[in-house]
Image (cartoon, grey):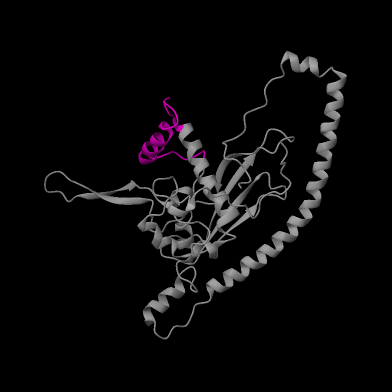
């Protein structure tokens, strides 16, 4: 279960109609509103009590995550392993189990080469240096969004020690628990080292006559495209083509850039939300293939979110 439905913002409340204005003067409606307000007070009080339980849960969860990280950072001594291979393994993100997070991500159902989040061959070399993935709520209400923090070992690709995505959510009414993802921010851009930016490829450009040809950088799909500000950064031509084809399956109307950005934002958000609620807490079981069955076995999956908000209404 996902804590928030992926909507890009929430539609503003409708203007009061004449019927609503007349109803506000009805004594019966006024009494009903008082009952609603009383229920809301009870709910808020319950949320306060649940907050204490959440704090205790998060403390215990973080302790387990730290133990997992310690195990992954301890390089095993293998006398049969080639010395150069062993030395290289110690420089990777998880020396205790090289490539751990790469394989976990590859087994996540939202990572798909036909989707907005995919891992390509040139991404794998960078993700070998991924040492940890964790999430943080922006506040204790769990209503304003969360951070995804990607920690990396020193590597030959970029300078950043960590990449931070901030997903901000909002709602237009305190009376309903309906949230929308408003925007994606990055704490700082990726500081790629010279010639190491995997989001671009170098293509040779033919020169006229006997002149030597040059090369130019051309955007290409990459797992690391999701570390960007949305809305805010322009789409490249390949992204427009991919997104327009995806959206045309749902609508015959002409698709503009704003709609494409909204769709892409939702795709990034849904991936992050699945990581936060399911993949990170169960990463060992994802690694061994126990969490997400194969296509032949999957059927309809309904995974509980380990950080789900237990005070959601189940009333109908």
At horizontal 43% and vertical 33% (from top left) the residue drawn is: 247
Question: Residue 137 vs residue 165: left or right?
Answer: right
The answer to which of 114 and 150 lies nearer the viewer is 114
Whether residue 246 appears in magenta in the rendering, the answer is yes
Q: Position of residue 7 (x, y in %)?
A: 57, 37
Question: Residue 137 vs residue 248: left or right?
Answer: right
Looking at the figure, which quarter contains the C terminus? top right
Q: Position of residue 139 (x, y in %)?
A: 70, 49
At horizontal 40% and vertical 34% (from top left) the residue drawn is: 244
Whether residue 108 appears in magenta in the rendering, the answer is no
Q: Is residue 83 above or below residue 215?
A: below
At horizontal 54% and vertical 63% (from top left) the residue drawn is: 285
Q: In this view, does 266 lie above or below 22?
A: below
The answer to which of 238 and 180 lies nearer the viewer is 180
Q: Is residue 165 visible?
A: no
Q: In which quarter of the image is residue 294?
A: bottom left
Q: Is residue 230 above or below residue 26?
A: below
Q: Is residue 286 visible?
A: yes
Q: Which range is magenta?
A: 230-257
Question: Residue 164 vs residue 120: left or right?
Answer: right
């Amino acid at each position: 279960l996902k804590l928030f439905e992926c909507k890009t913002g929430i539609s503003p409340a409708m203007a009061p109609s004449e019927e609503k204005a007349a109803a506000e003067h009805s004594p019966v409606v006024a009494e009903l509103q008082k009952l609603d307000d009383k229920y809301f007070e009870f709910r808020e009080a319950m949320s306060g009590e649940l907050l204490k339980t959440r704090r205790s849960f998060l403390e215990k969860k973080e302790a387990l995550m730290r133990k997992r990280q310690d195990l992954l950072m301890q390089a095993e001594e293998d006398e049969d392993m080639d010395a150069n291979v062993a030395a290289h393994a110690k420089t990777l993100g998880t020396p205790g189990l090289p490539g751990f997070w790469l394989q976990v991500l590859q087994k996540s159902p939202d990572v798909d080469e036909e989707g907005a989040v995919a891992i390509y061959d040139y991404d794998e070399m960078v993700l070998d240096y991924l040492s940890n993935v964790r999430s943080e709520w922006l506040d204790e209400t769990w209503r304003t969004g969360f951070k995804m923090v990607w920690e990396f070992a020193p590597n030959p690709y970029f300078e950043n020690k960590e990449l931070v995505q901030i997903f901000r959510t909002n709602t237009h009414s305190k009376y309903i628990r309906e949230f929308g993802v408003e925007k994606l921010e990055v704490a700082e851009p990726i500081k790629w080292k010279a010639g190491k930016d995997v989001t671009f490829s170098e293509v040779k450009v033919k020169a006229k006559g006997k002149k030597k040809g040059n090369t130019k950088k051309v955007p290409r799909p990459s797992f690391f495209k999701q570390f960007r500000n949305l809305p805010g950064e322009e789409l490249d031509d390949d992204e427009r083509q991919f997104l327009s084809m995806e959206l045309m399956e749902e609508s015959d109307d002409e698709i503009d850039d704003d709609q494409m950005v909204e769709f892409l934002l939702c795709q990034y958000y849904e991936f992050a939300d699945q990581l936060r609620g399911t993949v990170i807490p169960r990463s060992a079981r994802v690694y061994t293939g126990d969490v997400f069955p194969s296509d032949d076995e999957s059927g309809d999956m309904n995974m509980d979110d380990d950080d789900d908000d237990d005070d959601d209404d189940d009333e109908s």
